[in-house]
Amino acid sequence: MNKLLFITNLLMGSVLSRFAISKLSGWEISVKAFIEMAHPLGIDPTLFRISTGVMISIAVLGYIVTAIFSLVKNKPSILNLPFTKWATLTNLFGLLAMLGALTAEFSLRVNPKWMLVYIAIGIVILSATNIYILNTQKQITKN
């Protein structure tokens, strides 16, 4: 199971890193998308884009750290959290961020970008699977 956690967390962190970079560095496609999505909300599109980029960057770092420590035999605590709790919270954060992305995609865009929808759904499924695996491992170690 640790290899599966490694692969899925590394994959999700890698995929999301592209989106964090595009938002934080102000790629034209990202700027245009956030102008479109901020308009119905009446908020500043730059602040919306950058805060989203920071949130996705946090998820990326969480996924990457989880991937690295999933291969360590005697897992240390991370930020004073046991590994399983850290990994569960990281995957929950990513899952909720992608649910927010899906909500924005369908409620704030005129035409949803289907590739982004598929990527977000994939991350939701992988994160939910990881949370299930982590909680199953937690139950096994308690018994």
Image: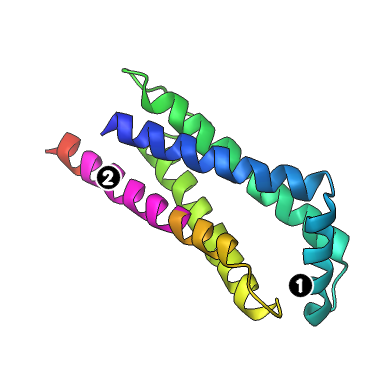
Mark 1: few/some/many CA within 10 Å (<14, 14-19, 20+): many
Location of the N terminus by quadrant is top left
Location of the C terminus by quadrant is top left
- Considering only order in the chain, which callout, 2 or 1, is on the residue closer to the N terminus? 1
Residue type at mark 2: give it.
Answer: Ile
- Residue at image position (40%, 45%) is 88
User: On residue 80, which mark appears?
Assistant: none
Residue type at mark 1: give it.
Answer: Met
Query: Residue at label 2?
Result: 133
Position of residue 98 in the picture relative to residue 34 (left or right):
left
In reply to whether residue 94 is colored magenta, the answer given is: no
Q: Secondary structure at mark 1?
A: helix
**Picture coordinates of residue 71, whole percent (x, y):** 36, 22
Closest to the camera, between mark 1 and mark 2, is 1
Task: Write down the region rendered in magenta.
Answer: 123-138
Query: Residue at label 1?
Result: 37
- Residue at image position (80%, 53%) is 50
In reply to whether residue 134 is colored magenta, the answer given is: yes
